[in-house]
Amino acid sequence: MTKPASRQRKIIHIDMDAFFASVEQRDNPQYRGKPLIVGGSPRSRGVVAACSYEARVFGIHSAMPSAHAVRCCPQALFVRPRIDRYREVSQEIMGIFHNITNLVEPLSLDEAFLDVTENSWGECSATRLAEIIRKEIYTATGLTASAGVSCNKFIAKVASDINKPDGLTLIPPEQAEAFVASLPIGKFYGVGKATKKKMLALGIKTGASLRQWTLPDLTFHFGKSGQFFYNISRGLDERPVQPGQMRKSTGRETTLSEDIDDILEIQTILKELAREVGESLCTLHERGFTLTLKVRFQDFTTITRSHTSQIPITSDFDIYTLLPNLLTQVEFYGKKIRLLGVSVGKLTRNDEPHQLLLPFMKKGYLEITSSEKKI
């Protein structure tokens, strides 16, 4: 029987090891060898964005509240993220990838898929290429990376996490099905906490038990994702590596140190978030068309309100002009706010042509009278 096309490809997934924390330890010798946490202050509602491997041995992980993290490791060092610095290092790493193949699909600043079936070096072995890439990254940046090598994106992604940090895992095509069969369902890339809980409730604990389910049954329980789960349980993933895939949105959010309902405070916070998102658009040389306001209340209920504009959103001025209308669409019912977020979606490059509409809109800033003290 002819093997599926995906079995013939050579895919590498590169994942930097504790990227943010490793950059900080590289740039600041006083942090080396110590439990380091990149994120918000433990004296507020900050969260862990990343942490060093020295911190991970204490059970600390990303998205953990900083206050909890400091209880796990009182001697941990906390530093604020430097996104511009991480982006600079990331661009250097992505440049190494592009020296080998144009088929590079970044997933974030610190990881990417590479299709090296054909490559500029003429190297037949994807494993050798992965080793070369890891060595070049270390030589150029002093940072370590882990790699997964296989016949498709799903298996390569899962494989890159097996021998972290500073490791490489190869899953040959002939071992793909057995590898997936042995995986606990929680290790499946694309299976989040909610899906994992649902699968376990259905008796799906491993790739092998997932494979026992028919496509109609998986579709019934998981909708469109059912087809994906059906395929990967058989080691199949036909998704191509998509080079230069543009991000869909850029945004900022903040968890407040205290729950608030003062409209003037909300105005100040939204103005700062608008400034940060506007700076991000400028740095990315992109513009967007959909503005989204995110509000999380004190009871952790989270809502979003969006507006799609026919005129490009290019700056903090544009963002802050549109926010008042979104804010009026939020039903507060006397509840206080614990988190605010602003994002711009439907991004395009600034150099892409866009037909402006007539007549042009006149824009003005949000104004709130001093009498409007409470929502």
Image (tube, rainbow, N blue to C red):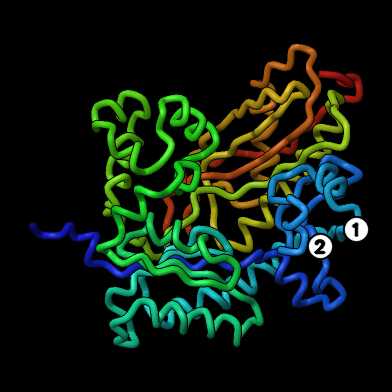
Task: Judge the density around disc 2: few (<14), some (14-19), many (≥20) Cα neighbours within 10 Å.
Answer: many
Find disc 1 in the rendering and name its residue: 75
* Residue 80 seen in render: yes
- Disc 2 residue type (three-letter): Pro
Task: Judge the density around disc 1: few (<14), some (14-19), many (≥20) Cα neighbours within 10 Å.
Answer: few
Within the image, what quadrant is residue 258 found in? top right
337 in relation to 59, above or below: above
Q: Is residue 22 left or right of residue 101?
A: right
Secondary structure at badge 2 equals: loop
Secondary structure at badge 1 equals: loop
Q: Are marks 2 and 1 in contact (CB under 8 Å)?
A: yes
120 in relation to 347, above or below: below
Q: What number is the disc on residue 64?
A: none
* Residue 104 seen in render: no
Q: Residue at x 59, y 50 (%)?
A: 250
Please state, as top left, top right, bottom left or bottom right, where the N terminus lies in the image.
bottom left
Within the image, what quadrant is residue 20 found in? bottom right
Q: Is residue 165 left or right of residue 350?
A: right
Q: Residue at x 51, y 73 (%)?
A: 94
Q: How far is the residue under mark 2 from the one under mark 1?
A: 7 Å
Please state, as top left, top right, bottom left or bottom right, where the C terminus lies in the image.
top right
Q: Position of residue 321 (x, y in %)?
A: 68, 38
Q: Is residue 227 left or right of residue 140?
A: left
**In-front residue for pair 35/43:** 35
Q: Is residue 177 left or right of residue 328?
A: left
Q: What number is the disc on residue 35?
A: 2
Of all residues, the one furthest to the left in this rendering is 1
Within the image, what quadrant is residue 224 found in? top left
Q: Position of residue 266 (x, y in %)?
A: 81, 32
